[in-house]
Image (spheres, rainbow, N blue to C red):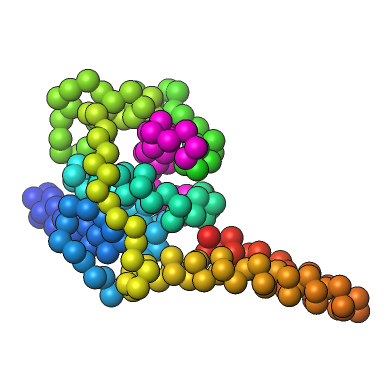
Amino acid sequence: MTASLNESSGILTEKLVNFLWNQWSSLGLAGYANSKSPFITDPEALVLLSTTIARHDPRLFGEIHDWLRENELWINLQRLRYLMREYPFGEATVLGAMAERISQENRHSKWKFIIRHIPIPVDKDPAPFFFSIPLLSTPEPVFARWGWLRGPVEFREMSQPPRTDQPAAFLFKLREALDEAMPALVRAGVAYELRSTRNLRGANLVRSLLADIHSLLG
Protein backbone atom coordinates (compact mmCIF):
# COMPACT_ATOMS: atom_id res chain seq x y z
CA MET A 1 0.00 0.00 0.00
CA THR A 2 2.78 2.44 0.98
CA ALA A 3 4.76 1.60 -2.15
CA SER A 4 1.67 2.19 -4.28
CA LEU A 5 1.07 5.58 -2.67
CA ASN A 6 4.70 6.58 -3.14
CA GLU A 7 4.56 5.54 -6.79
CA SER A 8 1.34 7.50 -7.35
CA SER A 9 2.85 10.53 -5.63
CA GLY A 10 5.93 10.30 -7.83
CA ILE A 11 3.83 10.09 -11.00
CA LEU A 12 1.73 13.10 -9.94
CA THR A 13 4.83 15.13 -9.11
CA GLU A 14 6.39 14.31 -12.48
CA LYS A 15 3.21 15.39 -14.30
CA LEU A 16 3.03 18.64 -12.35
CA VAL A 17 6.69 19.40 -13.07
CA ASN A 18 6.12 18.74 -16.79
CA PHE A 19 3.03 20.97 -16.63
CA LEU A 20 5.13 23.81 -15.22
CA TRP A 21 7.81 23.34 -17.88
CA ASN A 22 5.10 23.52 -20.56
CA GLN A 23 3.34 26.56 -19.14
CA TRP A 24 6.48 28.55 -18.44
CA SER A 25 8.17 27.72 -21.74
CA SER A 26 5.07 28.93 -23.57
CA LEU A 27 5.71 32.28 -21.83
CA GLY A 28 9.36 32.47 -22.90
CA LEU A 29 11.20 30.31 -20.34
CA ALA A 30 14.58 29.07 -21.56
CA GLY A 31 15.91 25.53 -21.34
CA TYR A 32 12.96 23.56 -22.66
CA ALA A 33 11.57 22.57 -26.05
CA ASN A 34 9.49 25.40 -27.48
CA SER A 35 5.96 24.92 -26.24
CA LYS A 36 2.76 26.35 -27.68
CA SER A 37 0.25 25.63 -24.97
CA PRO A 38 -3.39 25.86 -26.13
CA PHE A 39 -4.42 26.98 -22.65
CA ILE A 40 -4.61 30.49 -21.24
CA THR A 41 -2.02 30.84 -18.46
CA ASP A 42 -2.71 32.65 -15.21
CA PRO A 43 0.80 34.03 -14.58
CA GLU A 44 0.37 34.99 -10.92
CA ALA A 45 -1.17 31.63 -9.98
CA LEU A 46 1.64 29.95 -11.92
CA VAL A 47 4.23 31.81 -9.84
CA LEU A 48 2.63 30.63 -6.59
CA LEU A 49 2.35 27.02 -7.75
CA SER A 50 6.00 27.13 -8.78
CA THR A 51 7.15 28.08 -5.27
CA THR A 52 6.36 24.51 -4.21
CA ILE A 53 6.26 22.20 -7.25
CA ALA A 54 9.28 23.65 -9.09
CA ARG A 55 11.49 22.77 -6.12
CA HIS A 56 11.33 19.16 -7.32
CA ASP A 57 13.44 20.23 -10.33
CA PRO A 58 16.34 22.63 -9.55
CA ARG A 59 16.87 23.50 -13.23
CA LEU A 60 13.20 24.40 -13.66
CA PHE A 61 13.23 26.54 -10.52
CA GLY A 62 16.38 28.32 -11.67
CA GLU A 63 14.89 29.13 -15.08
CA ILE A 64 11.65 30.41 -13.49
CA HIS A 65 13.66 32.65 -11.16
CA ASP A 66 15.58 33.93 -14.17
CA TRP A 67 12.34 34.58 -16.12
CA LEU A 68 10.86 36.54 -13.21
CA ARG A 69 14.00 38.67 -13.06
CA GLU A 70 13.99 39.38 -16.79
CA ASN A 71 10.22 39.86 -17.14
CA GLU A 72 9.08 41.34 -13.84
CA LEU A 73 7.01 44.02 -15.59
CA TRP A 74 4.65 41.32 -16.87
CA ILE A 75 3.68 40.18 -13.36
CA ASN A 76 0.93 41.98 -11.45
CA LEU A 77 2.33 42.01 -7.90
CA GLN A 78 -0.87 43.38 -6.37
CA ARG A 79 -2.81 40.45 -7.81
CA LEU A 80 -0.04 38.06 -6.76
CA ARG A 81 -0.32 39.35 -3.21
CA TYR A 82 -4.12 38.99 -3.33
CA LEU A 83 -3.91 35.37 -4.51
CA MET A 84 -1.27 34.60 -1.90
CA ARG A 85 -3.56 35.94 0.82
CA GLU A 86 -6.84 34.42 -0.38
CA TYR A 87 -5.64 31.10 -1.82
CA PRO A 88 -2.61 29.92 0.18
CA PHE A 89 -1.38 27.16 -2.14
CA GLY A 90 2.12 28.57 -2.54
CA GLU A 91 5.03 29.06 -0.14
CA ALA A 92 5.30 32.73 0.84
CA THR A 93 8.84 32.49 2.23
CA VAL A 94 10.10 31.06 -1.07
CA LEU A 95 8.50 33.97 -2.93
CA GLY A 96 10.08 36.38 -0.44
CA ALA A 97 13.53 34.87 -0.98
CA MET A 98 13.12 34.98 -4.76
CA ALA A 99 11.96 38.60 -4.63
CA GLU A 100 14.82 39.73 -2.38
CA ARG A 101 17.41 37.95 -4.51
CA ILE A 102 16.08 39.64 -7.65
CA SER A 103 16.09 42.99 -5.84
CA GLN A 104 19.77 42.50 -5.06
CA GLU A 105 20.44 42.49 -8.79
CA ASN A 106 18.27 45.55 -9.45
CA ARG A 107 17.68 48.00 -6.63
CA HIS A 108 14.79 49.52 -8.60
CA SER A 109 13.04 46.17 -8.91
CA LYS A 110 9.32 46.26 -8.21
CA TRP A 111 9.69 42.90 -6.38
CA LYS A 112 10.49 44.99 -3.28
CA PHE A 113 6.72 45.47 -3.02
CA ILE A 114 6.29 41.75 -2.25
CA ILE A 115 9.11 41.67 0.32
CA ARG A 116 7.35 44.32 2.40
CA HIS A 117 4.28 42.09 2.77
CA ILE A 118 5.91 38.77 3.71
CA PRO A 119 7.31 38.34 7.24
CA ILE A 120 10.76 36.78 7.47
CA PRO A 121 10.59 33.66 9.70
CA VAL A 122 12.44 34.14 12.97
CA ASP A 123 11.83 30.88 14.85
CA LYS A 124 12.22 28.45 11.95
CA ASP A 125 15.28 26.27 11.53
CA PRO A 126 16.51 26.44 7.91
CA ALA A 127 15.27 23.48 5.85
CA PRO A 128 16.57 21.90 2.62
CA PHE A 129 15.17 23.86 -0.30
CA PHE A 130 15.14 21.28 -3.08
CA PHE A 131 13.28 18.07 -2.32
CA SER A 132 15.80 15.63 -3.78
CA ILE A 133 19.12 17.52 -3.94
CA PRO A 134 21.34 17.75 -0.83
CA LEU A 135 23.23 20.94 -0.09
CA LEU A 136 26.84 20.48 -1.21
CA SER A 137 28.08 24.06 -0.94
CA THR A 138 27.81 27.14 1.26
CA PRO A 139 24.15 28.13 1.67
CA GLU A 140 22.95 31.06 -0.40
CA PRO A 141 22.60 33.84 2.24
CA VAL A 142 19.33 35.40 1.05
CA PHE A 143 17.47 32.09 0.92
CA ALA A 144 19.01 31.07 4.27
CA ARG A 145 17.63 34.26 5.81
CA TRP A 146 14.18 33.18 4.64
CA GLY A 147 14.62 29.73 6.16
CA TRP A 148 15.87 27.72 3.16
CA LEU A 149 19.17 25.96 2.46
CA ARG A 150 20.29 25.90 -1.16
CA GLY A 151 23.39 26.60 -3.23
CA PRO A 152 24.28 29.82 -5.06
CA VAL A 153 21.72 31.49 -7.34
CA GLU A 154 22.90 31.97 -10.92
CA PHE A 155 20.85 33.99 -13.40
CA ARG A 156 21.51 32.82 -16.96
CA GLU A 157 19.66 35.79 -18.51
CA MET A 158 18.38 33.63 -21.38
CA SER A 159 14.63 33.93 -20.81
CA GLN A 160 12.54 35.65 -23.45
CA PRO A 161 9.53 37.95 -22.97
CA PRO A 162 6.11 36.38 -23.54
CA ARG A 163 4.78 36.27 -27.07
CA THR A 164 1.37 37.89 -26.87
CA ASP A 165 0.27 36.16 -30.09
CA GLN A 166 0.29 32.82 -28.23
CA PRO A 167 -2.85 31.54 -26.42
CA ALA A 168 -0.93 31.08 -23.16
CA ALA A 169 -0.15 34.81 -23.06
CA PHE A 170 -3.73 35.97 -23.62
CA LEU A 171 -3.92 37.71 -20.23
CA PHE A 172 -0.77 39.67 -21.05
CA LYS A 173 -2.30 40.77 -24.34
CA LEU A 174 -5.51 41.76 -22.57
CA ARG A 175 -3.52 43.79 -20.05
CA GLU A 176 -1.67 45.58 -22.84
CA ALA A 177 -4.94 46.45 -24.51
CA LEU A 178 -6.44 47.66 -21.24
CA ASP A 179 -3.39 49.81 -20.48
CA GLU A 180 -3.76 51.48 -23.88
CA ALA A 181 -7.50 51.98 -23.50
CA MET A 182 -7.63 52.98 -19.83
CA PRO A 183 -6.76 56.70 -20.25
CA ALA A 184 -9.56 57.15 -22.76
CA LEU A 185 -12.01 55.17 -20.62
CA VAL A 186 -11.17 57.22 -17.55
CA ARG A 187 -11.54 60.46 -19.48
CA ALA A 188 -14.91 59.29 -20.77
CA GLY A 189 -16.00 58.36 -17.24
CA VAL A 190 -14.96 61.77 -15.89
CA ALA A 191 -16.74 63.62 -18.70
CA TYR A 192 -19.89 61.59 -18.10
CA GLU A 193 -19.69 62.30 -14.40
CA LEU A 194 -19.40 66.05 -14.98
CA ARG A 195 -22.33 66.12 -17.42
CA SER A 196 -24.68 63.96 -15.40
CA THR A 197 -25.23 65.44 -11.94
CA ARG A 198 -28.50 63.53 -11.69
CA ASN A 199 -26.71 60.26 -12.22
CA LEU A 200 -23.58 60.94 -10.19
CA ARG A 201 -23.81 57.60 -8.41
CA GLY A 202 -23.91 55.76 -11.72
CA ALA A 203 -20.88 57.65 -13.03
CA ASN A 204 -18.88 56.86 -9.90
CA LEU A 205 -19.89 53.23 -10.25
CA VAL A 206 -18.52 53.17 -13.81
CA ARG A 207 -15.21 54.64 -12.67
CA SER A 208 -14.99 52.20 -9.78
CA LEU A 209 -15.67 49.28 -12.11
CA LEU A 210 -12.92 50.41 -14.49
CA ALA A 211 -10.49 50.67 -11.60
CA ASP A 212 -11.43 47.17 -10.40
CA ILE A 213 -10.90 45.71 -13.88
CA HIS A 214 -7.52 47.36 -14.17
CA SER A 215 -6.48 46.07 -10.74
CA LEU A 216 -7.59 42.54 -11.57
CA LEU A 217 -5.82 42.32 -14.92
CA GLY A 218 -2.76 44.34 -14.02
Compared to 37, does 131 lie above or below? above
- Residue 92 lies in the magenta-colored region: yes
- Residue 203 lies in the magenta-colored region: no
- How many marks the image carries: the answer is 0
From the viewer's side, name the closer residue of 45 and 74. 74
Residue shown at 53% from the left, 41% from the top: 113
Residue shown at 91% from the left, 79% from the top: 198
Q: Is residue 75 left or right of residue 54?
A: right
In the current view of this chain or complex, which residue is farthest to the left? 3
Q: Position of residue 116 (x, y in %)?
A: 54, 35
Residue shown at 15% from the left, 61% from the top: 33
From the viewer's side, name the closer residue of 168 and 149. 168
Residue 33 can be seen in this image: yes
Q: Position of residue 138 (x, y in %)?
A: 22, 20
Q: Is residue 14 left or right of residue 184?
A: left
Q: Position of residue 114 (x, y in %)?
A: 50, 41
Compared to 176, does 62 lie above or below? above
Residue 20 can be seen in this image: no
Compared to 126, does 162 lie above or below? below
Q: Residue 151 lies in what quarter of the image? A: top left
In the current view of this chain or complex, which residue is farthest to the top? 138
Q: Is residue 72 left or right of residue 30?
A: right
From the viewer's side, name the closer residue of 74 and 56. 74
